Image (spheres, rainbow, N blue to C red):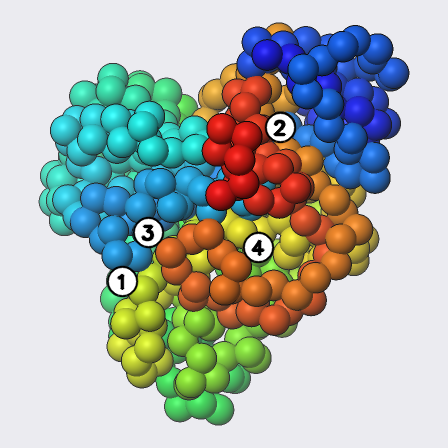
Amino acid sequence: MSLLIKNGRVIDPISNIDEVKDVLIKDHRIAAVAKNIEVAAEKVIDAKGCWVVPGLIDVHVHLREPGFEYKETIETGSKSAAIGGFTSICCMPNTNPVIDNTKVVDFILNKASKEAVVKVLPIGTITKGQLGEELAEIKEMVKRGICGISEDGKTVMNSRLMEEALKLAAELNIPVFSHCEDHALAGKGVMNEGKRSRELGIQGIPSASEEVIAARDIALAKDKGAKLHLCHISTKGTVEILKKGKDEGVFVTAEVCPHHFALTEEVVTAEDTNTKMNPPLRSQEDVEAIREALRNGIIDMIATDHAPHHEKDKNTSYEKAAFGIVGLETAVALTITELVEEGILTPMQMIELMSSNPAKLLGIDRGTLGIGKMADITIIDPEETYPIDKNQFVSKAKNTPFHGKKVKGKVKYTIVEGNIIVENGSLIEGGQKI
Ligand SMILES: NC(=O)N[C@@H](CC(=O)O)C(=O)O
Ligand SMILES: [Zn+2]
Ligand SMILES: [Zn+2]
C-alpha cells in the first residue's frame, strides 16, 4: 500500500523541517519527504493549506476500561483520540480493577489490539490497589509492556515509598508520572482557593497542595537517574519549582492541559460542573505563567488528561460532581486558538509539545517523519473555524466546558502506521465513513 500526501506544510521538529513538501508512505513507513514527489501511489491526499505533522501523542488519557465502561471504553476512547489527531495515547491506571498487575496489562493490550484504532500504551500504578502501602508488580508489568507508572487520581503520600518507586523506575528506565496533590492540603476542596472560591463560598484547593508534592518529587528524583514527569501542572509556583529542578540538572519534565492555559477560575459557577477538574482552574496570574512556560520551553508537553464522566457523575452539586473533563477532541483547536493564533507558540513548537517531546519521554521511535519511521501522521487545517459541539464528540462522554466556543484548527486526517483512520474529519473503516 502506498500513500502520497501532496503540497502540505510539513512540520517535523526532530528532522528540523518546516516547509511545503510531499510525503510518501510505503508499507506503513515514511519512504520519502521531498518537493514534488512524482510517483503513482494507490492513494493521494491533497494537503494544500494544511500542516502535515508527526502523529500527535497524548501521555495522559483515561480510557476507563476495565470497570467504568459506561463512561468510556478502549474502543470509544481510542476513536476519540483519532478524531483529535492522536496516533498514540497512554492510558492511566485508575480503572477497576486498577492496572497494578500483569493480568490487567494483558487485558488492556489484548483488547486494544482488537478494538483500538490508535496505539494504546498502558501506564501501571505505583502501588498495589492504588492504596499507597506497597509497590505494585512494577517489574513484571514493564516486561508485559507498560510505558510508565503513575498513581494518577491520587498522590503516593508516603515519601519513602515514592522514593523506592523512583529508584526502581530508574533501573527499569521508565518514567514516573506524578499527580501532585497533597491530600491533607487539598482537603475537601473542589475549586481553586482564591478570590473566586471566596465569592462563591465554595471550598478551595490551595496552590500549595500541588507545589509541595512537585518540590518533594523533584527532591526525591535528584541523583537517582529517574525520569520524573509532573502531570497536569497548573500553578505559577509549580512552574518555578520545575525550572529550578531543571536548572539543577534533575531529569524532570511536565505537561499542561489545554483547560489550564485556556481558562481561569473566573469561569467557575456553582451550576457548571464541567468547570470542575483536578487540579482546578487557577488564577489569571497562574495562566499567564503557564503560557510563558510553554513559550520558553520550561513546560515540555501538552496532554489532555481526557477524563470522561457520565451525565450522572456530573449532573449533581458542585461538591459531589466528579472531577475531570474530556479533552481529546478539543486539544488541537484549543492549542491553535489560544497559543498559536496568539503568537505564544510557533506551529513547530506546538508539534514539539504534542508529538516529539512526548515520544522522547516515552522512549518510543515515533513523533517524527524521519525516513524509515512508522507512518503515524496527522494532517491539520489551521484555518478552519467552527464552534466546538459536544454532541459531535465520538467519545461516550460530553463533559466539556468548551461547548459552543468558537475555535480555529481542525484535524482532517489521522494516519496510524500508514492506515487512514480519520479522513476529512470523520472516522472511516475499510474505506467507509462511520
Ligand atoms: N483530572 C481529573 O479531574 N480527574 C481524573 C483523575 C486525575 O487526572 O487526577 C479522573 O480520573 O477523572
Ligand atoms: Zn491527576
Ligand atoms: Zn488524569
What whole-number distance in Å separates the C-alpha atoms at marks 4 and 1?
30 Å
**Upstream in the sequence, badge 3 or badge 4?**
3
Secondary structure of the residue carrying numbered label 4 = loop
| Label number found at residue 330 | 4
Query: Is 87 displayed left or right of 142 in the figure?
Result: right
Residue 95: x and y, percent?
A: 23, 47
Q: Which residue is mark 3?
A: 72
Farthest-out residue, front: 432
Q: Contact (CB < 8 A) between labels 1 and 3? A: no
Please indicate, yes or no, whether residue 391 appears anywhere in the rendered image: yes
Disc 1 residue type?
His
Secondary structure of the residue carrying numbered label 2 = strand
The quadrant of the picture occupied by the N terminus is top right
Q: Which residue is mark 2?
A: 377
What whole-number distance in Å separates the C-alpha atoms at marks 3 and 4?
17 Å
Task: Say few, some or many: other residues with alpha carbon within 10 Å of mark 1 (under 14 / 14 to 19 / 20 or more).
Answer: some
What whole-number distance in Å separates the C-alpha atoms at marks 3 and 2?
25 Å
What whole-number distance in Å separates the C-alpha atoms at marks 4 and 2?
18 Å
